Image (tube, grey):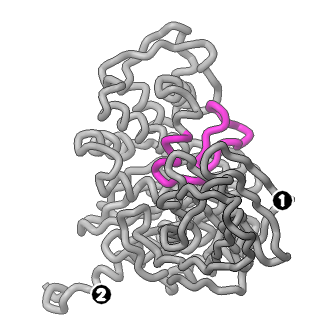
């Protein structure tokens, strides 16, 4: 089990119940160790998140399936409590409840199966049946987490002390060892143009499924044209562009109009959000078409790295689509964030995001040696403050330098002398 330090209070970032899968997802902005118990008649699963604050008042949400209602509130000033009330006529066995996480800040509750009962035949019970919290499973289901790289985390924190006016969230993951650096990785930020990364992956999933053709063309519609970055906004209404060219502009020059055309082709925001949740991205939501200048679309550094982990491990795309996605992302023209901190010969497939109040970048980095790691960083900043750019560049340089030195240190001495 993962234990977290009680010194820093956590906050509940998001939660989502998937009625189709009978699965509850919880994310907090730092690590927690949940406690859970079951109470029968009516059946209620109670989950406490110690050391976790809840912003706002009690929330109640009703469902029409075997889960009747979920209530979210404060047990006390330092504990957030969720109560999942099972619908009348149903119960669930304690041994069939599974609570596990892919990190100490993302927990998944799986109700394996519900059982029909006659509630009237059961006496009321306030007995609390403890539920075992499972061990943390591989990150994104594919990368076993190692240890936090404390030496690197200390360097990043020292750097942040010089940029105290910035509010960052970051997650870096060494694919070889599973070791990582996590600083507010689950914290929700405006996504800006980093939202275009999951949109691109969703597009190529539809191409793999045969529902979208790479050689089809899209027509420019007036309601999809928007300002901000990109050149397609200057084309005439009705102009047709190939799907591949539109998707490429969405990423390489971060074209907002191209993004809206792709979102529209994929069926709109609701369908995409459902897709994102199916990948385990609980903090990634499209609420408005681009340009989302008010920052209503959201994501987290860890969500962006989750998606990168799924892509590089062939979990969401065919080999052909994966190659095309990475090739497009390697051609991003903005090199001022993560790429500016990389060593000579390193290759990055990434997507940046820029708003007045936000800078972000996320990608897959391959060193000349073949070593790979994943990066996600989002920084809230004073409006248009350029120092956020320098901060991201310096963090990137610290991480790259540390992992490169660690690689050299792990080589046999004979190899190092050659």
Is residue 285 highlighted in magenta? yes
Q: Residue furthest front?
A: 121
Residue at horizontal 68%, vertical 79%? 128
Left/right of residue 207 with respect to residue 70 in the rendered view: left
Q: CA distance from mark 1 to mark 2?
A: 52 Å
Residue at horizontal 55%, vertical 74%? 104
Residue 412 on image: x %, y %: 18, 89
In the structure shown, which secondary structural element does the residue marked by tag 1 occupy?
loop
**Which residue position is annotated with label 1?**
58
Residue at horizontal 67%, vertical 49%? 190
**Which residue position is annotated with label 2?**
409
In the rendered image, the vertical position of residue 61 relative to residue 82, given as above or below: above
- The residue lying toward the viewer, choosing from 411 and 210, is 210
Left/right of residue 218 with respect to residue 93 in the rendered view: left
Task: Report which quarter residue 163 is drawn in.
Answer: bottom right
- The residue lying toward the viewer, choosing from 248 and 333, is 248
Please identify, in this view, whether the residue under mark 1 or under mark 2 is nearer the observer.
1
Is residue 416 highlighted in magenta? no
In the structure shown, which secondary structural element does the residue marked by tag 2 occupy?
helix
Q: Are marks 1 and 2 in contact (CB under 8 Å)?
A: no
Task: Report which quarter residue 288 is drawn in.
Answer: top right
Residue 305 on image: x %, y %: 47, 59
Magenta segment: 273-299
């Amino acid at each position: 089990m993962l234990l977290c330090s009680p010194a820093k209070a956590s906050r509940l970032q998001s939660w989502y119940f998937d009625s189709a899968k009978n699965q509850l997802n919880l994310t907090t902005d730092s690590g927690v160790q949940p406690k859970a118990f079951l109470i029968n008649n009516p059946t209620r699963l109670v989950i406490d998140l110690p050391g976790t604050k809840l912003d706002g008042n009690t929330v109640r949400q009703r469902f029409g399936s075997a889960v009747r209602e979920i209530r979210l509130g404060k047990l006390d000033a330092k504990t957030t409590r969720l109560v999942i009330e099972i619908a009348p006529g149903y119960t669930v066995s304690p041994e069939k409840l599974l609570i596990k996480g892919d990190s100490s800040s993302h927990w998944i509750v799986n109700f394996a199966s519900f059982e029909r009962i006659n509630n009237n035949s059961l006496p009321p019970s306030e007995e609390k049946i403890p539920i075992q919290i499972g061990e943390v499973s591989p990150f994104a289901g594919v990368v076993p987490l190692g240890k936090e790289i404390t030496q690197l985390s200390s360097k990043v924190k020292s750097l942040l002390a010089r940029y105290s006016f910035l509010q960052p969230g970051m997650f870096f993951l060494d694919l070889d060892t599973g070791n990582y650096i996590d600083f507010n990785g689950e914290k929700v930020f405006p996504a800006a143009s980093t939202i275009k990364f999951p949109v691109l992956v969703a597009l190529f999933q539809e191409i793999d499924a045969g529902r979208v053709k790479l050689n089809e063309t899209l027509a420019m519609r007036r309601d999809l044209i928007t300002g901000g970055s990109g050149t397609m906004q200057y084309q005439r209404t009705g102009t047709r562009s190939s799907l591949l060219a539109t998707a490429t502009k969405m990423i390489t020059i971060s074209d907002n109009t191209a993004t809206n055309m792709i979102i529209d082709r994929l069926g709109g925001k609701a369908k995409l959000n459902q897709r994102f949740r199916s990948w385990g991205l609980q903090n990634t939501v499209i609420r408005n078409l681009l340009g989302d200048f008010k920052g209503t679309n959201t994501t987290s550094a860890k969500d962006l790295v989750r998606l990168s982990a799924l892509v590089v491990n062939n979990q969401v795309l065919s080999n052909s689509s994966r190659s095309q996605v990475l090739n497009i992302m390697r051609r991003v023209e903005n090199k001022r964030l993560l790429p500016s901190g990389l060593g000579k010969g390193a290759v990055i497939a990434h997507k940046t995001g820029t708003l007045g109040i936000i800078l972000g970048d996320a990608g897959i980095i391959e060193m000349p040696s073949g070593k790979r790691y994943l990066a996600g960083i989002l920084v809230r900043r004073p409006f248009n403050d350029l120092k956020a750019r320098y901060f991201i560049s310096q963090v990137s340089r610290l991480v790259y330098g540390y992992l490169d030195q660690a690689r050299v240190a792990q080589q046999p001495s004979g190899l190092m002398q050659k």
